[in-house]
Image (cartoon, rainbow, N blue to C red):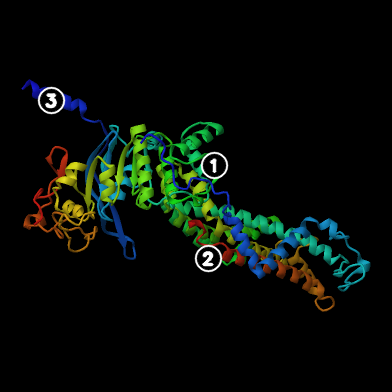
């Protein structure tokens, strides 16, 4: 009995390595045509935002009153110019930077807050009641109203818009994370870690959090769309980006006065917002379908 | 007279050391209901269990599902808070210790879980899962940890190549070996095997049991072996505890208990073991009815509702836990009486 008992099937199968859950999800996502379109739009937009100075020949804030209100497909400016003669194309391209960055910052801050609250609430039964009541309180305000309230307190600027939107993202994120934590913490491997004497912090961060990434990723993608839309909405209301910052919502609001003479001043940024929001929503939807609920069990 | 006193002394010397002692363990789960979530009663999962576990022995715990076997195991490890009772480990009461002092005992007591699929984090490479045990409790360097994990893997019959694999890349038996490796990583003296081989098929079961036995001899381990498989318990354990509805029913050495069961419930359980012979006649004792609701257990002896030899006294009085023969305990008014 002293010799080592060999396990069945210990020989390493070098035939084919099992694919990681990430690759499986990606493959499923790429089968969804709508999601692929969305992904392409997002990638193009990120490219645009990064290479902004390379693909535009005009400064987005530089006025040129001689060439004001040029229509679309003009010789020098293919998307025309606004009432101050600023190139609409470069404003859209630089606007992509602002939208993506504000969206990213807002969603990340919201995730940090939401995930922390959700983890604590889901893991500690005693904290759950308190945290969920705070979340309910935040939920009871209409989103835009809450954001406006926060901006009214903090003052108008893009940074404050990001903060406002992040606070508004916290409650829904906290709920989603709490739900996953509640189911994961009953799993046997969590019990096993407890029996090994792992601290609560280690269990939460190293064992529960990685296993609720799937819903968090879907949430974050969908939230990007909402965040970009809300940034535009707040800027349209004059609470976000201040002139001459080339922000899409602000551009619509400024172009509104020239709706009849130069409709492209509102339509072009409108299409930009629409495409972005559409892309993020579609990718989020695709991700939700692609992430198999059974993946954890395999 | 001189001879007999010498005998008692030598008995004292040979008496194995008590590693773990349970005194009147109770675990009730509250039932909450209604609009205000008020407590409406208790599910009595473990009811007044007292026992001693000796160093180096395997104590089997058997009983039908829902009889509180697993809850007992979890309660010992502190994974479930006790309603009442004390747990002594190496003569120290462990439940009320602060975390810092408790860690020392946590390292001594480990658990192997029933489901080898569910007891490993699906997103953690098994090498890292094992390394984590050392990260938590030792100050080893990265290289030392890796070497320790490889040694562990080899100890349980796996190989170094398995280090970077995810749990889903293993078979059930291999996964249970990883669970065992994790449990022995800190050199414990006591391991609870909660249905550790029940999820495995028979050939793999035998391998895993052999491995557990080998480790027991090598490291002087004590096992609390929770199982519903009497055959496995007979092969693997030194003593057996039978539980019914959260109560201890009978406790004895494997030989005593299997050869001369005292309690009618034990007799019924043993008669249910399939026998590979057509010639010897053996009568199967069939119990009537289902397991009573543990939230509303029967009065008196918990088994009286299904017991073939129950009398009036069983309804009214709960039988005492009596040592009928040396090291053979039972709780029955009619202990030893065969079922007609």
Q: Which residue is denoted by mark 1 in the rendering?
A: B161
Q: Chain of mark 3?
A: B
Mark nearest the camera among 2 and 1 is 1
Q: Position of residue B29 (x, y in %)?
A: 30, 54
Residue B23 shown left or right of residue A26 in the figure: left
Q: Chain of mark 2?
A: A
Looking at the image, residue B250 sits to the left or right of residue B235; the answer is: left
State whether residue A193 appears in this view.
Answer: no
- Asked if residue A125 lies left or right of residue A61, the reply is left
Q: In the depicted view, which residue is nearer to us: A86 or B181?
A: B181
- Taking the image as drawn, is residue B327 in sight? yes
Residue B278 position, x and y percent, is 20, 57
Residue assigned mark 3: B7
Q: Are marks 3 and 1 in contact (CB under 8 Å)?
A: no
Picture residue at 40% right of the left edge, 52% below the top: B115
Which quarter of the rendered picture does the N terminus of chain B lie within? top left
Q: Residue furthest front?
A: B279
Q: Crowding near pointer 3: few (<14 within 10 Å), some, many (20+)? A: few
What residue is drawn where x is 21% and y is 30%?
A: B15
Evaluate if marks 2 and 1 touch, with contact meaning CB atoms under 8 Å apart: no
Mark 2 neighbour density, 10 Å: few (under 14) some (14–19) many (20 or more): few
Nearest to the observer: residue B338 or residue A171: B338
Upstream in the sequence, badge 3 or badge 1? 3
Q: Position of residue A16 (x, y in %)?
A: 58, 53
Kindly identify which numbered label has been placed on residue B68: none
Chain at numbered mark 1: B
Q: Residue placed farthest to the top in the image?
A: B2
**Residue indicated by mark 2:** A140
Q: Nearer the viewer, residue A243 or A23?
A: A23
């Amino acid at each position: 009995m002293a010799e080592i008992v060999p396990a069945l099937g210990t020989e390493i199968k070098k035939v084919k390595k099992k694919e990681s859950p990430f690759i499986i999800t990606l493959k499923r996502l790429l089968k969804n045509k709508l999601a692929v379109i969305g992904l392409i739009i997002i990638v193009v937009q990120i490219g645009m935002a990064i290479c902004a100075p390379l693909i535009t020949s005009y400064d987005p804030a530089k006025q040129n009153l001689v060439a004001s209100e040029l229509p679309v497909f003009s010789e020098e400016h293919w998307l025309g110019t606004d009432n101050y003669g600023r190139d609409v194309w470069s404003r859209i391209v630089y606007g992509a930077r602002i939208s993506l960055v504000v969206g990213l910052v807002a969603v990340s801050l919201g995730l940090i807050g939401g995930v922390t609250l959700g983890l604590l609430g889901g893991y500690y039964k005693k904290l759950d009641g308190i945290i969920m009541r705070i979340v309910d309180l935040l939920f009871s305000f209409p989103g835009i109203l809450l954001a406006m309230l926060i901006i009214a307190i903090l003052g108008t600027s893009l940074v404050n818009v990001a903060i406002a939107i992040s606070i508004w993202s916290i409650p829904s994120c906290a709920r989603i994370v709490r739900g996953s934590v509640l189911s994961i913490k009953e799993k046997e491997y969590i019990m096993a870690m407890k029996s090994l004497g792992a601290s609560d912090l280690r269990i939460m961060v190293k064992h529960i959090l990685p296993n609720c990434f799937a819903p968090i990723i879907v949430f974050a993608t969908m939230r990007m769309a909402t965040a970009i839309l809300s940034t535009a909405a707040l800027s349209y209301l004059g609470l976000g980006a201040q002139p001459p910052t080339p922000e899409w919502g602000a551009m619509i609001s400024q172009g509104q006065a020239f709706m009849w003479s130069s409709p492209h001043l509102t339509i072009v940024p409108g299409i930009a917002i629409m495409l972005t929001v559409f892309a993020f929503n579609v990718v989020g939807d695709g991700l939700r379908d692609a992430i198999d609920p059974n993946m954890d069990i395999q | 007279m001189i001879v007999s006193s010498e005998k008692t002394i030598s008995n004292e010397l040979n008496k194995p050391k008590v590693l773990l002692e349970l005194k009147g363990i109770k675990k009730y789960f509250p039932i909450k209901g209604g609009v205000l979530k008020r407590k409406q009663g208790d599910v009595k999962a473990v009811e007044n269990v007292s026992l001693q576990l000796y160093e180096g022995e395997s104590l089997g715990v058997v009983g039908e599902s829902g009889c509180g076997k697993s809850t007992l195991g979890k309660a010992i490890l502190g994974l479930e808070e006790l309603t009442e009772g004390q747990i002594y480990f190496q003569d120290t009461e462990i439940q009320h210790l602060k975390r810092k002092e408790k860690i020392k005992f946590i390292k001594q007591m480990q658990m192997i879980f029933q489901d080898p699929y569910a007891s490993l984090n699906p997103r953690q490479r098994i090498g890292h899962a094992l390394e984590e045990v050392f990260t938590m409790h030792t100050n080893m360097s990265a290289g030392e940890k890796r070497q320790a994990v490889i040694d562990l893997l080899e100890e349980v019959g796996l190989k170094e190549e398995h280090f970077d694999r995810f749990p889903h890349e293993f078979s059930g038996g291999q996964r249970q070996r990883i669970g065992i490796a994790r449990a022995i990583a800190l050199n414990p003296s006591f391991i609870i095997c909660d249905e550790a081989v029940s999820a495995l098929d028979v050939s793999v079961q035998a391998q895993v049991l052999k491995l557990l036995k080998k480790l027991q001899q090598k490291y002087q381990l004590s096992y609390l072996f929770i199982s519903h498989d009497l055959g496995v318990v007979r092969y693997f354990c030194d003593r057996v505890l039978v539980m019914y509805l959260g109560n201890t029913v009978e406790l004895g050495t494997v030989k005593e208990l299997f050869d001369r069961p005292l309690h009618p419930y034990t007799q019924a359980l043993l008669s249910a073991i399939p026998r590979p012979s057509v010639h010897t006649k053996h009568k199967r004792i069939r119990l009537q009815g289902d397991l009573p609701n543990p939230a509303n257990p029967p009065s008196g002896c918990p088994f009286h509702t299904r017991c073939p030899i129950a009398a009036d006294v069983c309804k009214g009085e709960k039988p005492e836990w009596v040592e009928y023969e040396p090291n053979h305990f039972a709780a029955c008014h009619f202990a030893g009486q065969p079922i007609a």
